[in-house]
Image (tube, rainbow, N blue to C red):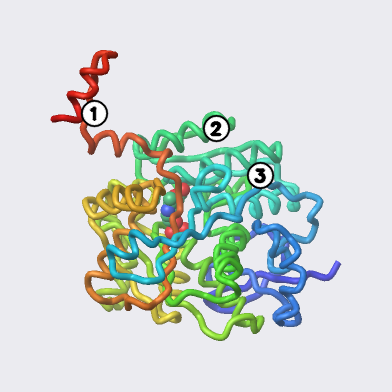
Amino acid sequence: MAWHYRLKCIGCGAEFPPNTIIYKCSSCGELLSVEYNNDLMSPEISLRWASRPLTVWRYIELLPISDSSKMVSLGEGGTSLNRCVRLGCELNLKNLYVKNEGENPTGSFKDRGMTVGVTKALELDMKRVACASTGNTSASLAAYAAKAGLECIVLIPSGKVAFGKLVQAIIHGARVIQVKGNFDEALRIVEELCLTQPIYLLNSINPYRLEGQKTIAFEIWDQMGHKVPDKVIVPVGNAGNISAIWKGFKELYMAGLIEKLPEMIGIQSEGAAPIANFIKGGLKEMRFVERPETIATAIRIGSPVNWKKAVKAIKESGGLAETVSDEEILSAQALLARREGIFVEPASAAAIAGLIKLADMKLIDRDETVVCILTGHGLKDPDIVLRQFPKPVEIEADLEALIKIFAS
Ligand code: AN7
């Protein structure tokens, strides 16, 4: 069978045939990327897309799957691109949009990656899948593994995963293992496990998973009438998503479907900001954060494995990186909920907090088109909200008592 793609090392350029179980380059140890055959990269590639529903699989010609009969899907993708008139007004931005990834089946963008990654696990005839996770990856993998009938193992940092996400992994039947340590440590041991046992690793060092996530870019292009925004703002943890979205835009460009590329803006939490510190500080060497800490537990990551891909995405695109405090994240979360009716988890609110900060600093022009990626649903982490707001008042079941409340 002729393949339409191959794996390529982002460091030394070594190429590997598709359908090899490999996560890093065997000669230099760098990350791998999926590259498509040149003859696919023409505007004709999009001819068949228009007649298909807006989902991850609309773009199958640019996905690394050969046997669509094995497809494991829960209806992921096709999330709304909402125009934010009220929030935009407040920030003095005329063309503000948010892409609401919380609408995905398990409530986060991870589903785009897992539909492709778990389909790949079946193609490779793997029976067990695993990941380390700050929560959403494990929730998503657990669901897709259940759908596919695969055994699922997830490692999470002890006590640092939002309740809703933990509950998802448990109900879908994953073997949930709490690691006394942070995400970075959990990832290190699960990677070693998968290299020594027949277990398929579905963290974002898996290049196939990121292919699913790049469809965020394709959908934005489709939803904007075959145009791309000036700026795309993405919360960054392990840095897979910003890298994937940039790859998506670049493929549209290589295929001749767009004439310009958006600037990629990465936002990290102050207490877990190795990439933002590296870019903002113009550092020569990456300094990982040994003890990452932030209220946005999804992005509580100190050694992002995809940092090289992400730095390249931000620099190549002429974008930038910024940090936001926990306070700024929580206030952005409430502002978005109250102005636009969208409830996101703190990691996603980091993108809005970054937007606010950059608008204040006049780093976004009033006329520019901006898209913020809202990566996960707010209901995954309700405790955080309850802790910040006073308890609702309680009254007797009596009209007068009710009227009294409004009078006060
Ligand atoms: C809501 O679930 O890393 O920069 O293990 O859940 O691609 O890592 C989650 C990451 C942003 C950061 N927003 O994306 C995990 C995990 C939400 C997230 C990110 C995550 P990457």
Task: Give SS at disc 1.
Answer: loop
Q: Position of residue 170 (x, y in %)?
A: 52, 30
> Spatial distance from mark 3 to mark 2, Cα to Cα?
21 Å
Residue 175: mark in rendering: 2
| 131 sits left or right of 366 in the view | right
Q: Quadrant of the C terminus?
A: top left
Q: Quadrant of the N terminus?
A: bottom right
Vertical placement of residue 101 versus 139, above or below: below
Disc 2 residue type (three-letter) = Arg
> Spatial distance from mark 1 to mark 2, Cα to Cα?
36 Å
Asked whether the viewer can see residue 340, the reply is yes
Residue 165: mark in rendering: none
Vertical placement of residue 208 versus 312, above or below: above
Q: Residue at x 21, y 32 (%)?
A: 390
Task: Give SS at disc 2.
Answer: strand
User: Residue most toward the left?
Assistant: 408
Badge 2 local density, few (<14 within 10 Å), some, or many (20+)?
A: some
Residue 74: mark in rendering: 3
Residue 391: mark in rendering: 1
Q: Is mark 3 within 8 Å of ligand 1?
A: no
Q: How many marks?
A: 3
Residue situated in front as seen by the camera: 378 or 187: 378
Disc 1 residue type (three-letter) = Lys
Vertical placement of residue 137 versus 289, above or below: above
Asked whether the viewer can see residue 187, the reply is no
Q: Position of residue 331 (x, y in %)?
A: 25, 51
First-in-chain label (1 vs 3):
3
Task: Give SS at disc 3.
Answer: loop
Residue situated in front as seen by the camera: 89 or 189: 89
